[in-house]
Image (cartoon, helix red, strand yellow):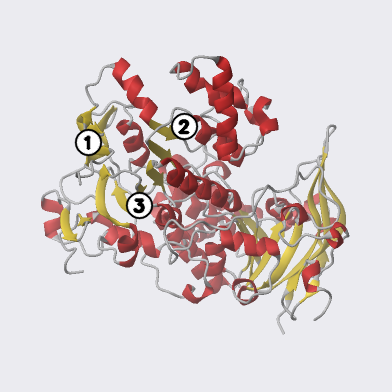
Amino acid sequence: MKETLLEVTDLVVKYKTDLETVSAVNGISFNLNKGETLGIVGETGAGKTTTALTILKLLPERVGIIENGRILFEGKDLLSLSERDMMKMRGDKISMIFQDPMSSLNPVHTIGAQIAEALKLHNEKNRTKEQLETRVDEVLEMVGIPPSRKGDYPHQFSGGMKQRVVIAIALACEPDLLIADEPTTALDVTIQAQVLMLMRELRDRLQTAMILITHDLGVVAQMCDRVAVMYAGELVETGTLKDIFTGERHHPYTKGLFGSIPKLNGESKSPLSPIEGLMPDPTDLPAGCSFYPRCPHASEQCLLKQSDAILSSTHTVRCRLFGKEA
Amino acid sequence: MEKLQPILETKNLKKYFNVNAGILHAVDDISVSIMPRKTLGVVGESGCGKSTLGRTILRLIEPTSGEIFFKGEKIVQSKSARMREMRMKMQIIFQDPYSSINPRMTVSEIIAEYMLFHKLYRSKAEVWNRTAQLMNTVGLARRLANAYPHELDGGRRQRIGIARALSVNPEFIVCDEPVSALDVSIQAQILNLLLELQKEFGLTYMFITHDLSVVKHISDEIMVMYLGQCVEKAPADDLFRNPRHPYTKALLSAIPVPDIRTRDKEIITIKGEVKSPINPTAGCRFAGRCEFADNRCTQTDVPLTIIGQNHLCACVRAKEI
């Protein structure tokens, strides 16, 4: 039996401003075992990034409000930790890689200094200055950047190299959990392949658990063990990679997502089967199932609050089509 | 039967930019021809010159040298009045629908603008009728006629861009990454729309994108660009079944496929990154990253050669690897 690393229960997050309240995350629960990779897939505005920011408690102050829920990391409740204790977690136990490597690096510091920063802040092994520098070299080598370039500034690197630096910073302290928010979306496809290979290799070597947030089902298929499909702040379907990518029984939204991707082995110029309509406005979500306005199987029952149907011990779908049966 | 004439043809088209560091070869010797009702897909990574190519063809950027023929007419030297007429037949849809439409105009004003400019109709009423009809064609609800672009989502804004391009009854449209900024479910809606419009109005597209699965889906023929040059050109199915250039091979193998059976397939990763297009040296521009490169690759430029039916490839070792 694998050990649970992270457990999120009934998480509800809202952004409140004077004008409106945005329901970004509406009661999601999932857990992650040590060394496992969970993919969170969904479209813009589904609440993927908000979920990640909530785990790190990086929501914008006063606006982003955690209304309900519990986040247990190695048995500790993150939401009750003080900011001081949380700072010890970030970068040491839990790290995050953001989508845009250009804006997550500081342009006026050398990359060596930026990697060393994380190491200095979490210097539990009491490394000396020289030892820290050696570690910086090690980390750079690990992500495939010659250590001789540690005195260079971010603008001297290309996009793919910058993302490698960001990965180096995130992994410098060998965290237990790495949250990667669209880590390759801003990169070209050949560079994306390089970065994904690197992440896969490092994850396997360091046994890091990972939450990979992406909109690209292709990336999920190559990287993840388990998948959670997110729509309008809810997890509409969760399962192992096999549960989601094979079989017939899926949430209509998951089916729509797969139908929208042009197939490489498909017939050219044949029409796709997209999902009609748009994602609902998060300030005014429909009652019941949030997908029913776009769903081909919608009926009156969909107006009621939906619960998860358990299809197997690993596969759940939040849709009335599947009833409550196991 | 008369021989079909290509809608658009370029011959040795070049666009160089003078920059501080030297001469940037954005588009270097591109010759294409697109037959009526067909789609040429142009793929490549950022900075390979694909957008510059699209804009140069419409003379939104003046070419440095080379020829462009639209239905057999040379347009490089055309006077601006003639060019204005030509542009009714050749339109462009941009990547970012928000920065390519005026935020202070309503949806119907944006769509009507080109028709008013080109004085296509005698009365305003006819223009508004046509606008309503176009909105219907691209799937925009009538109630949005007086909305402003900021009130709409990306997919709808892209539909405005498409309606505007269609308003002057073009025959040829350059689609410059029209779906790259959109979510996958919306992307599929727009791709379907473009395919329907092509069938209905007999349009010819040049479809520029970095997304290989999209280009496969929409194109009849595909051209792969690398640092301003065409490295391989072939019918879409042929290119995907039988890629010959090492760059194309790497590009195709790097696509993450949403299928778990291919999870452990070997990915041909290419080392390093794209080199600078400024003052490129002679020889194959991909040679520095290519695992098959030998001394033949770096001595002289590698021309595009025919290696199969309609299949062109610029690689000295295309036959052996």
Q: Report the residue marked by disc 2.
A: B165
Residue drawn 61% across the image and 27% down it: B107
How far is the residue under mark 2 from the one under mark 1?
24 Å
Residue drawn 64% across the image and 73% down it: A36
Pick whichever, B130 or A304, lies toward us: B130
What's the amino acid at mark 1? Answer: Leu
Residue A87 visible in the snapshot = yes
Residue drawn 54% across the image and 34% down it: B97
The answer to whether tags 2 and 3 share a subunit is yes
Determine the secondary structure under disc 1: strand
> Looking at the image, is A3 positioned above or below residue A108?
below
What's the amino acid at mark 2? Answer: Ala
Pick whichever, B120 or A13, lies toward us: B120
Q: Report the residue marked by disc 3.
A: B273
What's the amino acid at mark 3? Answer: Glu
Q: Badge 3, how many Cα within 10 Å: few under 14, some, many 20+?
A: some
How far is the residue under mark 1 from the one under mark 3?
26 Å
Residue A92 visible in the snapshot = no
The answer to whether tags 1 and 3 share a subunit is yes
